[in-house]
């Protein structure tokens, strides 16, 4: 939701509604494509995933070897 807040503030309520029903992710990606921010979403998603995995490793005492 933070991506929608930052990049799609006018569509925030619509996005929130998407995630209350089945098939939300595909409708969300359609909207992102329509608004021209799909590539920004993929970069945001990748960064968020890396941060979450690093945090999980840290919390579970797993050392990441570069």
Image: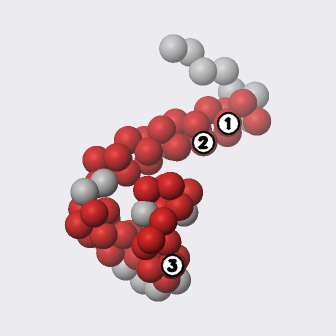
Q: Residue at x 67, y 36 (%)?
A: 55
Picture coordinates of residue 61, whole percent (x, y): 75, 28
- Seen from the viewer's position, the closer of residues 60 and 40 is 40
User: Do callouts 1 and 2 mark residues in contact (Cβ within 8 Å)?
Assistant: yes
Quarter of the picture containing the N terminus is bottom right
User: Do callouts 1 and 3 mark residues in contact (Cβ within 8 Å)?
Assistant: no
What separation in Å lies between label 3 and label 2 (alpha carbons)? Answer: 25 Å
In the rendered image of this protein, does residue 12 appear above or below residue 38? below
Q: Tag on residue 2?
A: none
Mark 2 crowdedness (10 Å alpha carbons): few <14, some 14-19, many ≥20 = few
User: Do callouts 3 and 2 mark residues in contact (Cβ within 8 Å)?
Assistant: no
Picture coordinates of residue 13, whole percent (x, y): 51, 78
Single out the mark in the foreground, 3 or 2: 3
Q: Tag on residue 55?
A: 1
Quadrant in which residue 36 is drawn: bottom left
Pointer 2 residue: 52
What separation in Å lies between label 1 and label 2 (alpha carbons)? Answer: 5 Å
Picture coordinates of residue 12, whole percent (x, y): 49, 72
User: Mark 2 or mark 3, which is nearer the start of the sequence?
Assistant: 3
- Seen from the viewer's position, the closer of residues 47 and 37 is 37
Q: Is residue 19 visible?
A: no
Pointer 3 residue: 13
- Seen from the viewer's position, the closer of residues 45 and 34 is 34
Q: Residue at x 32, y 75 (%)?
A: 27
């Amino acid at each position: 939701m933070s991506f929608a807040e930052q990049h799609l503030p006018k569509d925030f309520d619509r996005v929130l509604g998407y995630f209350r029903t089945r098939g939300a992710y595909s409708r969300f990606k359609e909207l992102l494509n329509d608004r021209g921010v799909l590539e920004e979403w993929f970069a945001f998603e990748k960064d968020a995933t890396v941060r979450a995995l690093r945090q999980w490793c840290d919390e579970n005492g797993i050392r990441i070897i570069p």
